[in-house]
Image: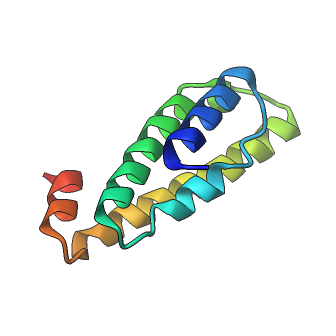
Amino acid sequence: MDVNDLEVHLTRALATSSPLNLLPELVARATTDDTRALHKSLFALYRVFTVALSSQYYAQSTSSAVTEVRKWLEQHIENYTDTLVSLLDHPSADIRASWFF
């Protein structure tokens, strides 16, 4: 699956409360050395996490299943954030500028 397919799949999964099993694959794609692929992956993750943060996964719930999914999702958001922070030292000025200025 390419990045676009992963994003579409995950966005649909969020809309239908389906499993988000492909999220780790998209997060992993954001560690490439290919500048174009890196941009594409990071923007896709931004859009997916924006949908996730505004979805029922962050609604108040006493369900342990929802709590576990929320923790799992937060772990991947943290990985994404760590990736963004690591880009502060990226050798490409295009990468540094596109995310922080």
Task: Decide: is 17 above or below 31.
Answer: above
Which residue lies most toward the right here? 64
Q: Residue 76 at what x, y percent from top left?
A: 59, 55
Q: Determine the residue positioned at 41% across, 65% down.
A: 83
Can residue 87 be seen at all in this image of the molecule? yes
Q: Residue 86 at what x, y percent from top left?
A: 34, 71
Q: Residue 66 at what x, y percent from top left?
A: 79, 36
Can residue 59 be seen at all in this image of the molecule? no
Q: Determine the residue positioned at 63% across, 37% down.
A: 10
Colour treatment of the image: rainbow
Left or right of residue 22: residue 101: left
Q: Determine the residue positioned at 43% across, 66% down.
A: 82
Left or right of residue 42: residue 13: right
Q: Quadrant of residue 84?
A: bottom left
Which residue lies most toward the front here? 1
Q: Quadrant of residue 32?
A: bottom left
Q: Determine the residue positioned at 74% across, 48% down.
A: 21
Q: Nearer the viewer, residue 56 or 32?
A: 32
Q: Residue 47 at what x, y percent from top left?
A: 44, 36
Task: Decide: is 11 above or below 23.
Answer: above
